[in-house]
Image (cartoon, helix red, strand yellow):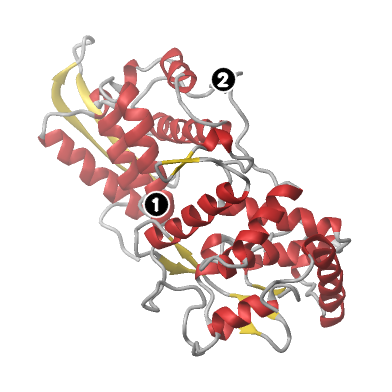
Amino acid sequence: MRYKHKRNKDGYFKETWLTDEVLPSGNKRRVVVRDKDYKTFVSKLEEAKRLHKKGITLEDMTVAQWGERWLSVYKATASDDLKAHFRAKLDYDIVPAIGDMRMKDVRASDLQQLLNNSPGKKGTVVKIRIAIRQLFDAADAEGIIERNPALKLELPDNLAESPRRPLGDNECKIVWGVAQSHTAGAYVLTMLLCGLRRGECVGLTMANVDFRKKRLSIHRAIRYSTNQGMEKAPKSLAGIRQVPIPDILLPILKKHCAGKKADDYVFTKVDGSRATGIAVRRWWESVLRQCHIASGAKQYRNKIMIETSLFSDEITPHYLRHTYATDIHAAGVHEKEQKHFLGHSSNDVTDIYRNVSDLSFNRAADLINQFFTDKYGTSTQE
């Protein structure tokens, strides 16, 4: 391919020009744009020229201005979900704190103070630090800053760990009991008893359900970066998998799926259309409310008094997946089958070439069936 600009011996495309700004040394300020990837180089060059026409030099860019450039150039090929993630970190965490500062004026103490004042759990603050590091690493690479103030940022000592735990035995019994009669019960129990992620569960169609073999086939997931959601492949190749439908879930799922066609989604809105982000959130909010009531929570003017509930209000659908992982381990399922059912990718290269045989699949399914029968008994819908 022929390019308008030639690649230098060092492998970079490069363009340089002098501005009218005179530095204290008496020399005019030099603008240098370079990159090994031609498309990225052209994008950087166009942005630099646009800023130059506005009288803004890269060295004088504020954190907010650089953040916009960084997103448009360095995250141009990122997924929509990742773009939305970094956009949120900029808009809600970084820019409100240091957005008006010039990039070259930011000190390590400014960034450390930003982290120290960041609300939320440890996982949230870790993600903010990642965004800050990438933002300033890119600025360092372009020569906007003379030194990188983000190199040695420390996490605050008083951060609470993100709540990632399985449900306790009493919480499991409450969820199981509520799900027997709740309209979203089959949806909740499919996550609890099959270990599906929320998006994988919503992405199931009837073609993915094999009642004869008692299996679910996972091929897609719904990502909710917008309310309508977008159908995408699972997080990794390992996410494309089959999982056993436990015997105690079978009658519940069959009843829920009665009358549906092969191309219908399993879990839908009342009108049969694919569930939106709002609909999925409301399903869980309704289930959570009933779990509070089932645990003995008091109500005031139809509002749950959370402090009187024995069911934790922090529980989300992902807790159900953690519970499944804990349960199949306790059931004695081999590690290889555990990874397969959960859709976890493996660091062991040999696992890439090994499939779960029908024999090992069925053996694991038997262990899971026995464990869930002992734990929950039988469904009231049988």
Under circle 2, the secondary element is loop
* Drawn side of residue 66 relative to residue 323, left or right: left
Which quadrant of the rendered structure holds the C terminus? bottom right
Under circle 1, the secondary element is loop
Residue 20 placement: quadrant: top left
User: Measuring 60% from the left and 36% from the top, which residue is drawn there?
Assistant: 162
> What amino acid does circle 2 point to?
Pro
Vertical arrangement, residue 322 with respect to residue 370, above or below: above
Which residue is at the front of the view, 202 or 100? 202
Front label number (2 vs 1): 2
Q: Which badge, 2 or 1, is on the more N-terminal residue?
A: 1
> What label sits on residue 26 in the rendered view?
none
Q: Which residue is mark 2?
A: 156
Vertical arrangement, residue 31 with respect to residue 354, above or below: above
Observer able to see residue 8: no
Q: Which residue is mark 1?
A: 37
What residue occupies the far top of the structure in this picture? 24
Which residue is at the front of the view, 6 or 255? 255
Which residue is at the front of the view, 284 or 70? 284
Q: Residues within 10 Å of mark 1 (few under 14, many from 20)?
A: few
Could you say where residue 126 lies in the image, as x and y percent from the top left? 54, 33
Could you say where residue 168 lies in the image, as x and y percent from the top left? 73, 46
Residue 234 placement: quadrant: bottom right
User: Measuring 28% from the left and 40% from the top, which residue is drawn there?
Assistant: 69
Vertical arrangement, residue 243 with respect to residue 57, above or below: below
User: Measuring 35% from the left and 58% from the top, which residue is drawn there?
Assistant: 226
Vertical arrangement, residue 48 with respect to residue 112, above or below: below
